[in-house]
Image (cartoon, rainbow, N blue to C red):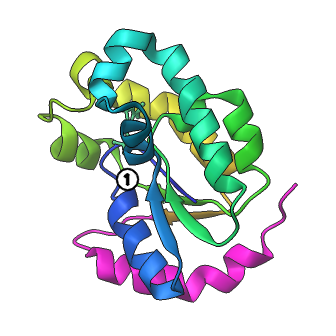
Amino acid sequence: MLIGFMGAGKSTLGRLLADHLGTAFYDSDTLIEEATSQSIAALFTTMGEPNFRELEHHVIATVAAQRSTVLALGGGAIMHEDTQELLRSTYIIYLEIGATTAIRRIGATADRPLARSGDLQTLLETRIAIYRSVASLTLREQEGETPQSTLTRLIALLPKLYQAERT
Ligand code: S3P
């Protein structure tokens, strides 16, 4: 599974990784939107963030039960305690970006409710320790790197990922 802040490129890298491994790719936001026929922004408004996190947890747990898939998680999924526990039991790639990159990429988008309402830098700072604590591998995006070159780096690190201790 891939975790990381909004704008980290989880879905792009996840698709490339799934192609490389010959497995299916899923994105938790897309699965939630398909299951509810509502947009993530609409769900935040109608159900509120805590209920959204609950729903997100169930979607992630369902996909986690299927082996050999690549799943990109919504950036805030790690805020749910049961999701954190679940993540600690599987292989997790944390795609790390800095606040400047995050703000440049997502600052102006209207479809991410927390990007609209929140201070992105503070949000990122409150999450970094959690991302790192559940990750089995952290990949920090390098200056000017393309998704394809991130994939190449990731492929070289896959043996290390599979050696990581999982609970
Ligand atoms: C969120 C990230 C979004 C989406 C929702 C909340 C967050 O996913 O799940 O807007 O709390 O960081 P992406 O990380 O795919 O943008």
Relative placement, left or right, of 32 versus 162 is left
Q: Mark 1 points at which residue?
A: 97
Residue drawn at (32%, 66%) of the image: 12
Residue 108 is situated, as x and y percent measured from the top left of the image, at: 11, 34
Q: Residue 140: x percent and y percent? A: 44, 63
Place of residue 80 in the rendered image (x, y in percent of width and height, measured from the top left):
63, 28
Confirm whether the magenta stretch covers residue 155: yes
- For the point 40% across and 31% down, the residue is 36
Q: In this view, does 149 lie above or below 136?
A: below
Residue found at the very far left of the displayed protein:
108
Q: Position of residue 75 (x, y in %)?
A: 44, 40
Q: Is mark 1 within 8 Å of ligand 1?
A: no
In which quadrant of the rendered image does the N terminus lie?
bottom right
* Residue under the image location 38 percent in, 77 percent down: 16
Residue 119 seen in render: no
* The quarter of the picture showing ligand 1: top left
The image quarter in which residue 138 lies = bottom right
Q: Is residue 110 above or below residue 100?
A: above
Residue type indicated by callout 1: Ile
Which residue shows up at 73% across the image and 32% down it?
82
